[in-house]
Image (cartoon, rainbow, N blue to C red):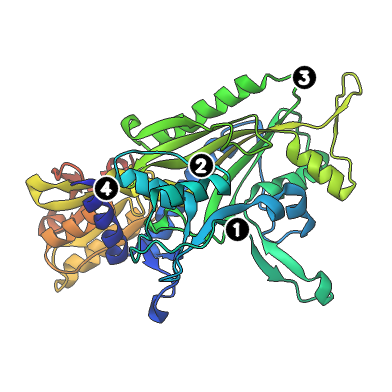
Amino acid sequence: MNENDLMTQVVALCKRRGFIFPSSEIYGGLANAYEYGPLGVELKRNIKNLWWKTFIHDRIDMLGLDSSIIVHPKTWEASGHINSFSDPLVDCKNCQRRTRADHLIENYYAQKQEPRLVEGLPIEELQKIIEKEQIACPYCGEFQWTPVRKFNLLFETSIGIVPESESKAYLRGETAQGIFLSFKNILDSTRVKLPFGIGQIGKSFRNEITLGNFIFRTLEFEQAEIEYFFDPQNSNWEELFDNWQEAMWQFVTTQLGIGKNNLRWREHTDEERSHYSLRTVDLEYNFPFGFKELWGLAYRTDYDLKQHMEYSGQDLRVTDSSDGRKYIPHVIEPAVGINRLLLMVLLEFLWQDEANDRLVLKLPYQLAPYKAAVFPLLRNKPELVAKAESVFKLVQSAMPTTWDDRGNIGKRYLSQDEIGTPYGVTVDFQTLEDDTVTIRQRDTTKQARVKIDELLAELDA
């Protein structure tokens, strides 16, 4: 299927089979907000668990954290989010639709088959391009734009237990700052020595202006971020950077099974790179709307801890036990959106099996929401149902399993193929005679009979 058909198929599958729904749909929906249904939440959890195992549990130099979503407002002053965390915004005077000026320009050049990256350019440069090219509104076709201006992405909220003048707070725009705020507590409460990293998975919130693309860019999303702290005098940042780049690549290609031909690295330009970063690269995936950022890797130097030292008045330096030298650790940050990983997985593994006239989600075993489905051949035969229930309980005790007794067995197979269940287990009349069941493999459709007491070994991938 072509790229546009693929995206359409994924969106339709997610709604039809309970992976992802539009948020607040009974009220007409809320733009750029989605709910993760019974299958979506399991797939997302499997991705998060795999990330956590790989980067926290399987490493001796990593610790975990779950920081607060609402933190002291001075956090965002220190980090620069209040003054510089913004997108370039334009409004169409005709239809009142808002859009990001850089995305408007990039989409315009993409349609002309002249791909151009303008993200990070000053708003004055973006204004000149829009006027020079006379770029029309993608919604109404008119050229009636307001001037390009900065739009802060932080969500404001209020804390009700303090005086009104002090009540302003923000939903976090990234999870990284919570790590920096907890750095000293973690250092003091553990026996960890530099270099070491702190990782967490959690919700972030950005009041972004988007052009859709499903869950690629949303108002709230889950980030998996790591801040890796080190002494710049004793550790080579370039070697650490290369190591993290390789770890990210291995996770996506080996753990998630993504094809290398759909991935690429892109170095940030000087104009695009954040002012505190000495080097930033993005691991990009070839989405149906083009190669876009999946996972960012940045060398943030000592900017964050230094800023929080200045604004808080607290000493966040580390003492070198060998010579008493005090220093501010430097940081390398790999940061990925779990939602983008999930979208990539769905796009990568959705397969139209034309030979067998079926739609298959060929998820790797470790990512599949259910590892197996158990079917009684007929739902109106009590002896079959009872036997199937005992098989279901056996399998469910060892792995996530679903029960399906609707329709004929062929439709049940196809239904499980669509949601990515690797194995189907059918209990039929022969089962009652010899205690064997039929196992069907999702990708090949091959079937084999197996003794029930050998079933779990056969299903364990």
Q: Which callout, 4 or 1, points at the residue further toward the start of the chain? A: 1
Q: Position of residue 404 (x, y in %)?
A: 24, 64
Amino acid residing under circle 1: Leu
Q: Are marks 4 and 2 in contact (CB under 8 Å)?
A: no
Q: Which residue is mark 2?
A: 51
The one of 364 and 174 positioned closer to us in this rendering: 174
Q: Which residue is mark 4?
A: 422
Q: Residues within 10 Å of mark 2 (few under 14, many from 20)?
A: some
Q: Residue at x 45, y 30 (%)?
A: 265
12 with respect to 313 (left or right): left
Q: Residues within 10 Å of mark 3 (few under 14, many from 20)?
A: few
Q: Quadrant of the C terminus?
A: top left
Element under label 1? loop
Q: Is residue 451 above or below residue 218?
A: above
Q: CA distance from mark 4 to mark 2?
A: 21 Å
The one of 70 and 173 positioned closer to us in this rendering: 173
The one of 116 and 386 positioned closer to us in this rendering: 116
Q: Which residue is mark 3?
A: 233
Q: Which residue is mark 1?
A: 153
Amino acid residing under circle 3: Gln
Q: Nearer the viewer, mark 2 or mark 3?
A: 3
327 with respect to 265 (left or right): right
Q: Position of residue 224 (x, y in %)?
A: 56, 46
Element under label 2? helix
Q: Which callout, 4 or 3, points at the residue further toward the start of the chain? A: 3
Q: CA distance from mark 3 to mark 1?
A: 36 Å
Q: Is residue 16 above or below residue 223?
A: below
153 with respect to 448 (left or right): right
Q: Position of residue 123 (x, y in %)?
A: 57, 49
Q: CA distance from mark 4 to mark 1?
A: 41 Å
